[in-house]
Amino acid sequence: MDIKANSSIQKGMPFKGYHGRTGVVYNVTKRALGVEVNKLVNGKIIKKKINIRVEHLRPTTSRKEWIERVRQNELQKKALKAGEKEFRQLKRLPKAPKEAFMLKYEEKEVQTIQAIPFVDLV
């Protein structure tokens, strides 16, 4: 669950340090959920268990892109086994460096540019 405090409802509001964090639900009550959140304390990550009202929580969307990519890869694997498509790389690859190219240089005279001296016209 993503923790996003709703300021119009003050009951069961999480401490400001948890705003924007993502946690796992470990307990359910009538009006609140127990959420386990990682918190950085003195260089160590500690699991904190906090109870937050439902108004301040929403389902996380952080795994949607990953789940969709896995589904697309499975469909492509099935198509490959059936012989419909040729092999295609399914893994994500880092952005490659730019392709090399030769800079065309024309033989011309070199021009030297110099600053114009300041002249006070007043």
Image (tube, rainbow, N blue to C red):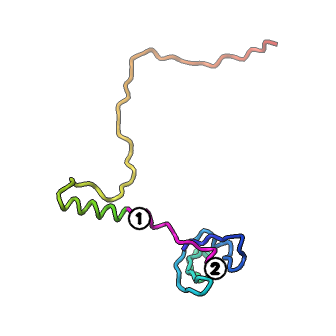
Amino acid type, mark 1: Trp
Give the magenta part as a residue range: 53-68
Q: Secondary structure at mark 1?
A: helix
> In the image, what residue occupies the spot 63% across and 19% down?
115
Q: Nearer the viewer, residue 62 or 100?
A: 62
- The residue where tag 2 is placed is 53
Quarter-wise, where is residue 5 in the image? Answer: bottom right
Q: Nearer the viewer, mark 1 or mark 2?
A: 2
The residue that label 1 is drawn on is 66
Amino acid residing under circle 2:
Arg
| Picture layout, residue 3 above or below residue 121 | below
- In the structure shown, which secondary structural element does the residue marked by tag 2 occupy? strand
Is 108 placed left or right of 74 in the picture? right
Residue 118 position, x and y percent, is 72, 17
Q: Residues within 10 Å of mark 1 (few under 14, many from 20)?
A: few
Q: Residue at x 39, y 23 (%)?
A: 105
